[in-house]
Image (cartoon, coloured by chain):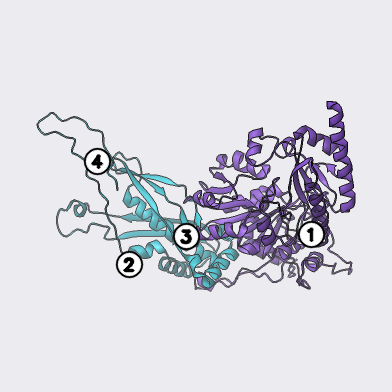
Chain colours: A cyan, B purple
Amino acid sequence: MRNSIPTAALSEFVNEVSDTPEEALMDYGIEINWESGTRSRTDTKPMKVGPHQVSRSFSWKADEPRQLMGNNHGPNPQELLLSGLGSCMMVSFIAGATAEGIQLETVRIDFDATLDLRGFMGLGTNSTVGFPEIKYKIHVTGDASQEQFAELHRKSVAHSPNAQTILNPVGLSGEIISTQMESQSVAGFAPTIQPRKKVQS
Amino acid sequence: MSDKTIQGDTASKAPRNTTGGWLSDLDRKRAAGPFLADHASPGTGMSTTAVHAGTHDDPRTGAVGTPIYQASTFVLGDNQYKSVEDGFVRDRFIYSRYGNPSQWAVQEKLAALEGAESAIVFSSGMAAITSTVLALMDKGAHVVASSDLYGGTFNLFNQEFPTLGMFATLVDPHDYEAIEAAIQPNTQLMYFEAITNPMLKVIDIPRLSEIAKRRNVRLVVDATFAPPVAMRTLDHGVDVVIHSASKYLNGHSDLIAGVAAGPRKLIDMIWPRLLNFGGSLDPHACFLLERGLKTLAVRMRAHEESAMALATYLEGQPKVQKVFYPFLESHPDHATAKRLLKNGTGNITFVIEGGDAAALRLVDALSIPKQATSLGGVESLISLPFNTSQATFTARQRADVGIDPGCVRLSVGIEDAADLIADFENALGTIYASKDLTHA
């Protein structure tokens, strides 16, 4: 099996979707709970693959380094963003190579990006809040020519959902459901440590 | 040496690789099968299908019937190597754990009988169940299943699932509201039996199918007690139908086998579990199963004829307290049975006066039915749930699924009804006469 992907099954799925487009609709969801400080835990919700529920029992944590008021207990949100982007480009690259009949030996993608936190902090007006640029290099060995790999690179980015989400404007529609609690600090008294309570979100 | 012959399904071809295009250019479509060449089945009736579908005369000699391909491995050529490379190994002969012409022949017959695109035979019904369930569930997934489950399936859910991070909720198979309420966001499967064992509850499969579709869950049904001829389970919207083929399908109590049948898409997902778990069926057992299947329709008619006559007789006996046979008007699910079953089966469950002690005397006093577990054979088989199929239950757990003391599980074979009735007449007379004597 080339690249551990059954080309026949990939082809059958593509043709199935062509005949029944609802099989292409994937519903995803995650839930993020604040744990402490800058640390949060993400849990995947069950997803829907076409018209069928699929269990996704996965969980991971994100945190910031100590220098950014965190405890360095996990990758930070920027690293997770790059990971989501790069893993998606990887799937696209491998699937495209397999369809093309290219046998891959190794694939590694290096990502680098610089963030200027002045945007996050609200200092200055010229720095963007997000990444102004994301750089990557794909290191690949396999039985295709340089031209074939270059074309595969172009096609795989063009068809990567996460790459296209980052490259194009995307709607972000949210709401907040808040509950106000009675203030537990009393002015004029010595401060006491109060147990943190989660705000319903 | 290079061999261009296609050893396998000649209709199955490798996808054409894209050249500078994208996935949308891939041209291989999913198709029913895999089939041996010239697999046309004459006629549409169940008897004709049972005799002819999937049976392939020997192309070399003209010998009638599928030869037994008693081989573990196959000579490899270009087409087999290509199937390995492109991931359609299921359509080529490579190694008998992956596929063998004897397996394909009987799979084709079973698929035709069930109206399925594809089928896989396994080395037992439990191998079919385990492979199917684990193909359709992921880590953390949940199944809603019948509380009347066959013991082997119950053990899979109860003993193995927690180890695998999977969970089951067991629900009364007649309580459709409770079944729906048990579905959770991580529920991937509803698992039920078409007719339950031993109480012979006939489950409203179309209603389960409606719930499964509306709630985006797959429905798998074990139809061991309702083989095709009695019911084509997939026609009622079920995703995958499973059988212990050791029962009615083979019909001769001389082999252990299982089958899963359904759309090619799902059976192709189950097939890697056949490879990984190793439950492949030996070619000689495939031959026996294929031969047994040829008489499925005529056997099922004979089972119904003798079982209906015997059930009617038993219902008229004063020492027989209850008789469960779906085609008797007294059966709680008679209306569902008349709607869903095109043919009766041989299973009768009844309760006699005097509890399990009297039931033990009865099975000893009978001369035709063999005192043995299993069902669906040409010979009548009789056993008691309390010391066989439900032996691990407490008396209260048995009562919860409707098994009263004195409950007898009978699988009526194809013997003459008159002989079976005479045997029961004699046995009932003997045991109650001897009981009266001991009390005298």
The answer to which image quadrant residue B74 occupies is bottom right
Question: Mark 4 and mark 1, same subunit?
Answer: no
Instruction: Classify mark 4: helix, strand or loop.
Output: loop
Q: Nearer the viewer, residue A108 or A79?
A: A79
Check disc 2 and give the amino acid type. Answer: Asn
Check disc 3 and give the amino acid type. Answer: Val
The answer to which image quadrant residue B108 occupies is bottom right
Instruction: Classify mark 3: helix, strand or loop.
Output: helix
The numbered dot on residue A91 is: 3
Check disc 4 and give the amino acid type. Answer: Met
| Residue ID for mark 2 | A168
Q: Chain of mark 3?
A: A
| Residue ID for mark 1 | B102
Q: Chain of mark 2?
A: A
| Residue ID for mark 4 | A69
Q: Chain of mark 1?
A: B
* Residue B57 as seen in the image, left or right of residue B178: right
* Residue B370 as seen in the image, left or right of residue B32: right
